Image (cartoon, helix red, strand yellow):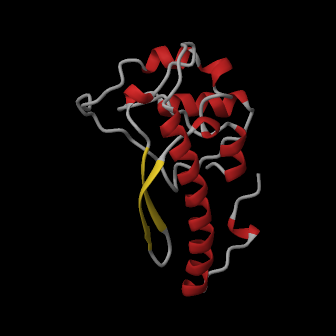
Amino acid sequence: MMTPRHVHEVNGWSNRYWGWGGEDDDMWRRVALHDLPVWRWPAAVARYTMLGHPAPPGVNKRSYELLKELGPYHRRDGLNSLHYSLVNYTSFIHHTRLLVDVGSPEDDLPLKGKGRKSSKRRRRSKVDAKDTRERIKVDAKDTRERSNIETTSADVPAW
């Protein structure tokens, strides 16, 4: 279980994994690099068994290559490098659904390479990101009022 503080400390999830595979190993390494606590429910309460299955379509063939680069790059790849555009915003009583466009694999730059993303896309993304944060703040307040829910620090595990 990760707290918001943990997510910020490891710079969130990588933006470089497309398709299936590697992103969970990348996050595990980020957690380990920061010596964050790992907590799991006891097996009597919850357990996970992966059933046999064929390889899913869209397997990321570069996953292992990307995992080798993790060490020095995770500080520049994650929350601080995320660019997106808000496509749709739907408010529900207990949650808010955001549909965002994060681009495509062709838009990504290798961290070792040269070049830049489109400045037009970057500008649009920053504006949308700020607008989205403001909308979420307003909607969160409205949602709490409608559902009469209060969240306290007791609701979050102490780490």
Residue for point 60% across, 85% down: 145
What is the x, y in percent for residue 98? Answer: 45, 59
Q: Is residue 32 left or right of residue 23?
A: right
What is the x, y in percent for residue 8? Answer: 69, 44
Residue for point 58% across, 80% down: 142
Residue for point 57% across, 13% down: 112
Q: Nearer the viewer, residue 61 or 132?
A: 132
Q: Nearer the viewer, residue 71 or 53?
A: 71
What is the x, y in percent for residue 34? Answer: 74, 32
Residue for point 28% across, 30% down: 58
Q: Quadrant of residue 132?
A: bottom right
Q: Is residue 112 left or right of residue 159?
A: left
| Above or below 137: residue 118 | above
| Above or below 48: residue 28 | above
Q: Is residue 21 left or right of residue 58?
A: right
Q: Residue furthest front?
A: 120
Q: What number of labels is visible?
A: 0
What is the x, y in percent for residue 158? Answer: 76, 57
| Above or below 77: residue 150 | below
Q: Nearer the viewer, residue 18 or 90?
A: 90
Q: Nearer the viewer, residue 24 or 114?
A: 114
Q: Quadrant of residue 18?
A: top left
